[in-house]
């Protein structure tokens, strides 16, 4: 018995805490006894009216997270054993702390402590709903013993909703919540609205009311029915739903919600207080002992009672799982597909176990090992991508991919996919003292530590996989420690850098604009420096580079003299930071060494359409070296597009999901936009502004909106051109330009620029700026108010680009023109930055403000390569293709008239007219 809840949440960022608690329960071996998959078709969420079994349908409609109320002090044998909850919590916390601090503690000692607390928290069913496909829902049940007495006394004193718990677990900055309320028989819907709205407002949640479904006014049992649902919404996309009610099947008593306001919080409070502390204890004990096969990691979860509709596998899923034959194996395939689609849940481990039953691991596994150099033990997190279609992995070639500066292991997933599909195993890891999941902060980065991480990775592969044919494929800065490691470790059989730098001194100079190595040798100590968006202790980093033999071209040449294995160095013809000529000079003449110039590739190696070809060439190179024969293009296996997308999505989900607060986001954009003005010094950006001005084709008397105007560069460019016209049409005074942005400081800078331009000529168009957050609410201008609209480099950074385009098109007059632009997918502005830095050094050599200009340029590239690029890699920001921009406009009835590349061929510009 007890209060009945339904937990229906499927936004990863919104339900991580709840899922984490479920995972803790899973680690405690609370048995999962049922997995069900159903297709409700087109019915509303939670209806499941197509299910014939009425009992199953009833459970599906109500959902269930059943939590037994805390038994009164003497009404339950469990309570008599350990006293009240407060005493149990205090005792457990003290015992866990003692176990964590005791060097001789074992994991077996942790679980009796936790079981005492579980006596207070008798979980009957946990039901998690996830959108498997557009019309499919999945539910998981987690069951354990249920007390049969001592719980029936409770009655709701005033029907209050447990809003404290809800507010703590559904908060999602920037989203709003819709609340549907079922009413008790004695109150009207209006009274319910007022009552519940006041309670939620007290928790800082402003409801957006919708109509109440008729069935929620039904009464059951003793007539007390409360049913409510909170939905987190972003535009038209539902992010998460939390539903709670005391609706039960016919013939059962309608169980009230919790009597004590403190009791209702125990779903979160108790589990978090104990299980999270237990997790800390378990982690500490694990670090001290080798007892890995314990109850904490057991995942023996039988699916003993399964009622499942068949889920047809997609092409993507068919490529991810082995082929099953026979009725039983077809059923297993259905379960695997279902589990694969429930991303982020704790049963990922079950999926891997089920796959392993019928086939050895073929995908990738997250592992960890340690760098123990100099007596310091640092944990390294890594992915192993197992080679496919091989009988003995130990005899396969293996590749270690050290990460580029400021990058994580996830950024090399595509190369890893190409390698594994062609029978080459991969170990890719996060550097220590870098970003990612390995230990240490990037502030303390040194190349010596990066080199020792490579050695630790080799040790791990040799020990766990028996690998003996190991090579390195480093990127960018990591090429230098890879050269050092190859010179000192005979286990490395080949070295294939991709856009790798052979000379740290020149690379740093091109990135930072100053010769940092030379300055360090002169005795200059610069302390913390921002390198590509990441703070680094330059004194430590540069000191290590100079003293450990990394600092210049000569040191690289000295290491290369010790290397006798093949080296193939891939360079990009569009890379501004690594010159192929310098690489060739450093490598020297040798039949075992080759420089490959790859046309169109820049330093980022993510140019759309080019990276796959480069990675296929990398595979050919490795196979030809290992097999000592020529490998043709037709011999290479290319991953399917669906597989690439699936792997990208899965690995992005593992990246940090910490959301920026509104103030943090505004602050980052403010700094970025301030640096953006420096692009006015570049030819590429000025040509981009000229293109936008020409394409929009303004006429006197027209009204234009610049959506996401930033610091007003486009507005000022257009007004400046008008101010310089010899034959100025006075009718321009009847025109009006409007700029909107959500960064107030940027708008203030725009206003100052406008006043400067107005001094050049009278009767310029009226120009106003306004703070508007395009993510929230309608535009404050009404419908069809503008003749021309420009959205320049904006859509990549809004939450719902389609919704923003819809707003903009709604504000456009019939026959009006609209321009959308976006950096192209995997755009690389390093060339633009490099040309800017060269210009400042040459044309501003005597300018007293030269250093200020250089600093502003660094600020821009630091933001672009720092938090913006990180958010892009996480999937928060997205750069759109030409086809995607076109589809946004065509969906709103816009006829496309022009599509071009601009901004140094890094931005896509699409122009259309409203029909």
Image (tube, rainbow, N blue to C red):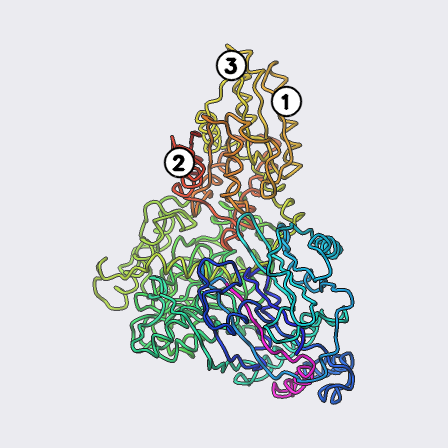
Distance from Cα at disc 2 to Cα at disc 3:
28 Å
Image quarter where the N terminus lies is bottom right
Q: Earlier in the sequence, mark 2 or mark 1?
A: 1
- Other-residue count near label 1 (Cα within 10 Å), few / some / many at <14 / 14–19 / ≥20: few
Q: Is residue 518 left or right of residue 907?
A: right
Q: Earlier in the sequence, mark 2 or mark 3?
A: 3
Label 1: which residue?
A: 756
Residue 877: percent from left, percent from top: 51, 49
Q: Nearer the viewer, residue 445 or 712?
A: 712
**Is residue 908 depicted above or below 365 in this figure?**
above
Q: Is residue 175 left or right of residue 826?
A: right
| Residue found 75% across the figure and 89% down from its top | 80
Q: Is residue 340 within the magenta segment?
A: no
Residue extent of the magenta highlight: 102-130
- Other-residue count near label 3 (Cα within 10 Å), few / some / many at <14 / 14–19 / ≥20: few
Label 2: which residue?
A: 901
Circle 2 or circle 1, nearest the eye: 2
Label 3: which residue?
A: 725
């Amino acid at each position: 018995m007890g209060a009945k809840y339904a937990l229906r949440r499927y936004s990863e960022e919104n339900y991580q805490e709840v899922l984490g608690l479920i995972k803790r329960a899973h680690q405690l071996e609370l048995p999962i006894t049922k997995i069900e998959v159903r297709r409700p078709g087109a019915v509303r969420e939670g209806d499941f009216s197509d299910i014939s079994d009425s009992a199953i349908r009833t459970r599906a409609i109500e959902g269930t997270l059943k939590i037994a109320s805390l038994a009164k002090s003497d009404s339950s044998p469990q309570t008599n054993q350990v006293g009240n909850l407060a005493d149990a919590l205090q005792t457990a916390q003290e015992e866990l702390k003692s176990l964590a601090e005791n060097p001789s503690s074992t994991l077996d000692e942790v679980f009796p402590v936790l079981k005492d607390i579980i006596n207070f928290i008798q979980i009957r069913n946990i039901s998690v709903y996830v959108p498997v496909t557009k019309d499919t829902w999945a539910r998981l049940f987690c069951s354990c013993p249920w007390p049969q007495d001592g719980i029936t006394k409770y009655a709701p004193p005033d029907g209050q909703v447990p809003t404290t718990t809800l507010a703590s677990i559904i908060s999602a900055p920037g989203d709003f919540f819709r609340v549907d309320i079922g009413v008790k028989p004695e109150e009207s819907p209006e009274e319910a609205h007022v009552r519940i709205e006041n309670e939620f407002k007290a928790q800082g949640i402003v409801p957006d009311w919708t109509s109440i479904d008729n069935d929620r006014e039904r009464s059951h049992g003793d007539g007390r029915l409360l049913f409510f649902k909170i939905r987190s919404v972003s535009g038209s996309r539902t992010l998460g739903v939390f539903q709670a009610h005391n609706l039960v099947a016919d013939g059962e008593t309608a169980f009230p919600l919790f009597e004590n306001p403190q009791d209702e919080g125990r779903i979160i409070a108790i589990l978090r207080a104990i299980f999270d502390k237990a997790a800390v204890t378990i982690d500490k004990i694990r670090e001290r002992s080798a007892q890995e096969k314990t109850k904490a990691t057991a995942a023996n979860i039988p699916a003993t009672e399964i009622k499942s509709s068949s889920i047809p596998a997609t092409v993507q899923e068919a490529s991810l799982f082995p082929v099953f034959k026979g009725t039983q194996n077809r059923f297993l395939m259905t379960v695997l597909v279902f589990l694969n689609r429930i991303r982020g849940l704790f049963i990922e481990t079950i999926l891997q176990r089920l796959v392993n039953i019928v086939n050895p691991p073929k995908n990738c596994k997250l592992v960890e090992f340690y760098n123990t150099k100099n007596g310091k033990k640092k944990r390294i997190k890594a992915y192993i991508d197992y080679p496919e279609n091989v009988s003995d992995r130990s005899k396969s070639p293996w590749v270690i991919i050290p990460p580029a500066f400021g990058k994580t292991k996830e950024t090399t997933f595509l190369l890893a996919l190409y390698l594994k599909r062609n029978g080459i195993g991969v170990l890719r890891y996060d550097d220590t003292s870098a970003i990612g999941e390995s230990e240490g902060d990037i502030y303390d980065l040194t190349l010596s530590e990066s080199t020792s991480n490579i050695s630790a990775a080799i040790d791990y592969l040799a020990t766990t996989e028996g690998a003996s044919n190991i090579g390195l494929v480093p990127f960018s800065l990591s090429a230098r420690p890879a050269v050092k490691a190859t010179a000192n470790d005979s286990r490395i059989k080949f070295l294939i850098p991709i856009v790798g730098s052979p000379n740290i001194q020149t690379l740093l100079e091109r990135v930072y604009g100053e010769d940092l190595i030379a300055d360090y040798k002169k005795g200059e100590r610069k302390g913390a420096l921002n390198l590509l968006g990441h703070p680094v202790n330059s004194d430590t980093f540069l000191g290590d580079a100079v003293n450990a033999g990394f600092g210049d071209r000569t040191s690289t040449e000295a290491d290369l003299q010790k290397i006798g294995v093949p080296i193939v160095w891939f360079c990009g013809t569009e890379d501004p930071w690594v010159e192929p000529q310098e690489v060739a000079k450093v490598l020297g003449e040798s039949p075992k060494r080759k420089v490959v110039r790859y046309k169109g590739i820049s330093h980022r190696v993510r140019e759309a359409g080019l990276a796959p070809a480069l990675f296929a060439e990398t595979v050919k190179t490795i196979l030809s070296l290992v097999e000592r024969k020529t490998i043709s293009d037709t011999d290479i296996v290319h991953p399917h597009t669906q597989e690439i997308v699936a792997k990208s999505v899965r690995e992005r989900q593992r990246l940090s999901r910490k959301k920026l607060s509104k103030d943090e986001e505004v602050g980052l954009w403010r700094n970025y936009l301030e640096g953006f003005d420096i692009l006015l010094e570049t030819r590429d950006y000025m040509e981009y502004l000229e293109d936008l001005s020409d394409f929009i084709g303004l006429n006197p008397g027209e009204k234009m909106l610049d959506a996401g105007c930033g610091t007003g560069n486009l507005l000022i460019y257009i007004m400046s051109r008008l101010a310089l016209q010899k034959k100025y049409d006075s009718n321009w005074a009847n025109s009006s330009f409007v700029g909107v942005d959500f960064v107030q400081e940027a708008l203030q800078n725009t206003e100052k620029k406008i006043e400067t331009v107005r001094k050049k000529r009278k009767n310029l168009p009226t120009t106003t700026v306004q703070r508007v957050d395009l993510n929230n609410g309608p535009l404050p201008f009404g419908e069809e108010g503008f003749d021309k609209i420009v959205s320049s480099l904006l859509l990549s950074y809004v939450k719902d680009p389609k919704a923003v385009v819809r707003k903009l098109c709604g504000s456009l007059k019939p026959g009006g023109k609209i321009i959308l632009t976006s950096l192209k997918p995997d755009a690389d502005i390093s060339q633009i930055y490099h040309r800017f830095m060269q210009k400042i050094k040459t044309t501003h050599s005597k300018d007293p403000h030269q250093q200020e200009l250089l600093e502003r340029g660094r600020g821009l590239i630091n933001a672009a390569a720092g938090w913006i690029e990180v958010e892009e890699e996480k999937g928060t920001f997205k750069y759109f293709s030409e086809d995607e921009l076109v589809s946004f406009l065509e969906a709103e009835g816009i006829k496309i008239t022009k599509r071009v590349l601009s901004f140094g061929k890094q931005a896509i510009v699409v122009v259309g007219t409203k029909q």
